[in-house]
């Protein structure tokens, strides 16, 4: 009995997989199908800007930026985030 759902639009930067992408019209259609449920929709632009991922080596990554020397095993979270922001020029 979940009280909300999250639907993520596929994020694909590989042209060989572009046939998996859905159009904006299809994305809007999905939102209409589930309009009566408590659903959170996240499209590509949102996902690119709003997720921080920790890989299996403890490296903090963001927006497809992967740094191999940014591990939470070596630095605290704030330091790792500073490394990411500096690398992206933020």
Image (cartoon, rainbow, N blue to C red):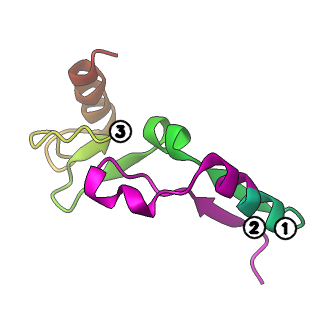
Q: Are discs 2 and 1 less than 8 Å apart at CB?
A: yes
Residue 86 appears left or right of 28:
left
Q: Work out whether residue 34 can be spotted.
A: no
Q: Which mark is residue 63?
A: 3
Q: Which mark is residue 9?
A: none
Q: Name the N-terminal-most of marks 2 and 1.
A: 2
Q: Magenta stretch?
A: 1-28
Q: Residue at x 26, y 57 (%)?
A: 16
Q: Residue at x 28, y 43 (%)?
A: 61
Crowding near the residue tagged with mark 1, few <14, some 14–19, many ≥20 C-alpha atoms within 10 Å: few
Q: Are discs 1 and 3 less than 8 Å apart at CB?
A: no
Does residue 80 belong to the magenta stretch? no
Residue where numbered disc 1 is placed: 37
Find residue 58 and report its horizontal and vertical position in percent.
21, 54
Residue furthest right in the image: 36
| Residue 48 drawn above or below residue 89 | below
Q: Residue at x 43, y 63 (%)?
A: 20
Q: Quadrant of the C terminus?
A: top left
Q: Which mark is residue 4?
A: 2
Secondary-structure class at tag 2 = loop
Does residue 3 belong to the magenta stretch? yes
Q: Name the N-terminal-most of marks 2 and 3.
A: 2
Crowding near the residue tagged with mark 3, few <14, some 14–19, many ≥20 C-alpha atoms within 10 Å: some
| Residue 53 drawn above or below residue 49 | below
Q: Residue at x 78, y 84 (%)?
A: 1
Q: Work out whether residue 81 can be spotted.
A: yes
Residue furthest bottom in the image: 1
């Amino acid at each position: 009995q979940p009280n909300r759902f999250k639907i993520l639009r596929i994020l694909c930067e590989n042209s060989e997989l572009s046939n998996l992408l859905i159009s904006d019209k299809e994305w809007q259609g999905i939102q209409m199908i589930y309009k009566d449920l408590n659903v959170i929709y996240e499209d590509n632009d949102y996902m690119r800007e709003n997720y921080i991922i920790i890989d299996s080596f403890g490296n903090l990554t963001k927006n497809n930026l992967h740094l191999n020397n940014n591990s939470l095993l070596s630095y605290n979270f704030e330091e790792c985030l500073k490394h990411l922001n500096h690398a992206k020029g933020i």
